[in-house]
Image (cartoon, rainbow, N blue to C red):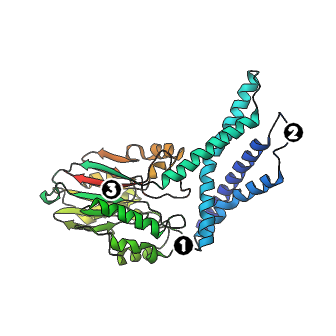
């Protein structure tokens, strides 16, 4: 009951913030000291009122239902929330320019300024939508101490955060599978959040994974979006498609130790350390830890892990959230980094969560070559 009350309170706060933001946009658009209220059309107020509740309504429905009209509604609402992120600073900038101009005694057409800045915000946002659908291949070389001879020169593919749901589904996964297979990796790692956590036919969405094969195996570890609740339907669907689901366990492939710890067991440092102790890594041999988030790399390093592969951060996905992600995760927010004797590679992910936009980050599939 307490959790439910907190959730309702959180949703109410989000909705109130969205309503205030839309009210601010309306007041900015209709304010015009140069002329009569020619821009105060009633339909604008009604339209913005609908948009202000669209994303919360679509999100609540998305956790219970899945059908074509709802998916279309969710996509439109999600794109709009992304555009809102750019429209709000455009509105603030309009008022700043207006205030500075008044203090300086300059005659600036306020509404023309608003039109220009709002137009620029929409263009930037739409570019973000396009950029989010353009998946890159990121290549890097990793040198590991005590790497088994069989793994020297081998390549692995890392993909994370596809977020299959109301925005992206099986057709998106099929394209990602095709891109990975074009690279011919020796092993493939899926670092969580394959699903978005919304209502979905999990088995049908995972079917393209049947074609995802590699000589040394395909491995998956659960992310936070699989573990909002009971993750069994997602894990069973992934396993049924022929992918090895790793849950607090180690497998050895040609003397390389491959470890998987799902998000829920790696989120708290004490529990994470206990899980890794139970796995009993051989610290004299190279190991790869697959875990969704780069939350506690110091725990993995202390356990003797050679390389941690993660996702989760999305590199903030788009500005200004990318700046916040950098402050939270610092050097582990993206790319190859090091802590002590361990290296960490954090991917920005292939999909998106919430608004399907990317600006300041790119969707990617990572190909790592071992030396």
Q: Is residue 220 above or below residue 363?
A: below
Instruction: Identify residue for label 1.
Output: 199
What is the distance, in whole Å, between disc 3 and disc 1 at their CAs? 28 Å
Give the percent coordinates (x, y) of residue 321: 53, 47
Residue at 17% across, 58% down: 151
Q: Is residue 62 visible?
A: yes
Q: Is tag 3's residue or tag 1's residue first in the polypeptide sequence? A: 1
Residue at 15% across, 53% down: 146
Say which mark, if any, is on residue 36.
Answer: 2
Residue at 58% across, 66% down: 3
What is the distance, in whole Å, between disc 1 and disc 2 at their CAs? 48 Å
Q: Secondary structure at mark 2?
A: loop
Question: Callout 3 environment at 10 Å: few (<14), some (14 to 19), or many (20+)?
Answer: many
* Res 39 quadrant in image: top right
* Res 60 quadrant in image: bottom right
* Res 206 quadrant in image: bottom left
Of marks 1 and 2, the one in the foreground: 2
Q: Is tag 3's residue or tag 2's residue first in the polypeptide sequence? A: 2
């Amino acid at each position: 009951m307490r959790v439910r009350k907190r959730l309702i309170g959180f949703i109410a706060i989000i909705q109130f913030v969205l309503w205030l933001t839309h009210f601010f946009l309306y007041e900015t658009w209709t304010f015009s000291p140069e002329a009569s209220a020619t821009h105060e059309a009633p339909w604008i107020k009604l339209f913005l009122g609908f948009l202000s509740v669209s994303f919360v309504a679509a999100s609540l429905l998305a956790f219970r239902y899945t059908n074509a009209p709802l998916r279309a509604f969710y996509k439109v609402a999600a794109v709009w929330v992304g555009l809102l992120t750019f429209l709000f600073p455009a509105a603030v900038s309009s008022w700043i320019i207006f205030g500075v101009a008044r203090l300086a005694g300059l005659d600036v057409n306020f509404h023309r300024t608003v039109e220009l800045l709002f137009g620029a915000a929409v263009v930037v946002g739409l570019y973000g939508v396009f950029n989010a659908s353009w998946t890159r291949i990121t290549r890097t070389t990793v040198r590991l101490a005590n790497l088994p001879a069989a793994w020297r020169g081998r390549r692995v593919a890392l993909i994370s955060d596809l977020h299959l749901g109301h925005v992206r589904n099986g057709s998106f996964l099929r394209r990602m599978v095709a891109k990975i297979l074009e690279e011919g990796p020796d092993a493939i790692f899926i670092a969580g959040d394959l699903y978005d956590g919304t209502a979905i036919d999990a088995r049908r969405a995972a079917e393209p994974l049947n074609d995802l094969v590699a000589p040394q195996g395909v491995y998956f570890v659960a992310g936070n979006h699989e573990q909002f609740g009971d993750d069994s339907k997602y894990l069973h669907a992934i396993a049924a498609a022929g992918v090895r689901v790793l849950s607090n366990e180690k497998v050895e492939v040609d003397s390389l130790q491959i470890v998987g710890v799902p998000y829920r067991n790696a989120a708290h440092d004490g529990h994470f350390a206990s899980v890794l102790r139970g796995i009993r890594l051989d610290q004299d041999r190279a190991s790869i830890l697959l875990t969704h988030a780069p939350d506690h790399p110091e725990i993995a390093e202390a356990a003797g892990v050679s390389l941690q592969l993660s996702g989760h951060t999305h590199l903030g996905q788009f500005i200004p959230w990318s700046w916040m992600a950098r402050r939270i995760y610092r050097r582990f927010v993206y790319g190859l980094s090091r802590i002590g004797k361990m290296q960490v590679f954090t991917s920005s992910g292939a999909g998106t969560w919430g608004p399907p936009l990317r600006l300041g980050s790119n969707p990617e599939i990572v190909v790592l070559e071992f030396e």
